[in-house]
Amino acid sequence: MYAFFNKIMLNEETIKNLINEAIIGRKNSYSPYSHYKVGAALLLENNEIITGCNIENAQYSLGVCAERVALQKAISKGEKSFLAIAIVGGREDEENEFSDYAFPCGACRQVMREFVNKNIFKIIVAKSINEYKIFTLEELLPFSFGKENL
Ligand code: THU
């Protein structure tokens, strides 16, 4: 399966590699309360990959999602051009194959909305490196609110 952005092609090898990085990133998940581990891997235009995992807190509302950790790591390094994010999630007893797709929560979709081109950026949700679905942010967050509205 191929997905195109501008002139850059996201080929199957790139997708599988990104999912694999999300699986690796997930290993650092700190989720003693939900026991639900999430990993994300963000692909930059320069081909660099930045991973994230969910990080919970005894004050439950301070927990942060894997997607936002990856994005905020990247933003804090001065990165501005994002091509795609792969996301995997599942109970802590799951490792490389997950029973469900982990879709980004509404808050993470809105944070992506701030920093990515909603028609180009790809969101890859995966059950394994061989089973995945690809969406644009526009598909997952239609009729959205962004800086152009202000
Ligand atoms: N979680 C994420 O990391 N990303 C999402 O998009 C949905 C939820 C995390 C937050 C919390 O640590 C755990 O999954 C259960 O909600």
Image (tube, rainbow, N blue to C red):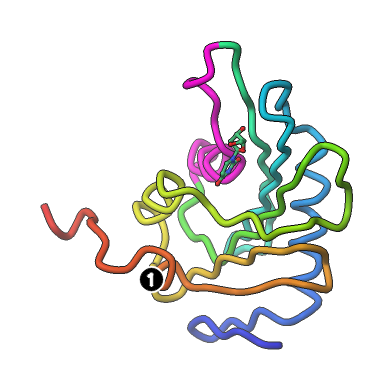
Task: Please determine whether, in this image, residue 119 is positioned above or below residue 29.
Answer: below
Determine the main secondary structure of the stretch shown in magenta. Answer: helix
Task: Please determine whether, in this image, residue 41 is positioned above or below residue 13.
Answer: above
Residue drawn at point x = 68 percent, y = 22 percent: 33
**The image quarter in which residue 101 lies:** bottom right
Specify the amino acid type for callout 1: Glu
Nearer to the camera, 56 or 14: 56
Q: Is residue 135 left or right of residue 145?
A: right
Task: Please determine whether, in this image, residue 22 is positioned above or below residue 57.
Answer: below
Residue at mark 1: 138
Measured as percent of width and height from the top left, residue 130 is found at: 83, 73
**The image quarter in which residue 29 lies:** top right
Magenta residues span 59-78
**The image quarter in which residue 26 lies:** top right
Specify the farthest residue to the top.
58
Q: Is residue 86 left or right of residue 142?
A: right
Residue drawn at point x = 58 percent, y = 81 percent: 8
SS for callout 1: helix
Measured as percent of width and height from the top left, residue 76 is found at: 50, 36
Nearer to the camera, 89 or 148: 89
Q: Is residue 77 magenta?
A: yes
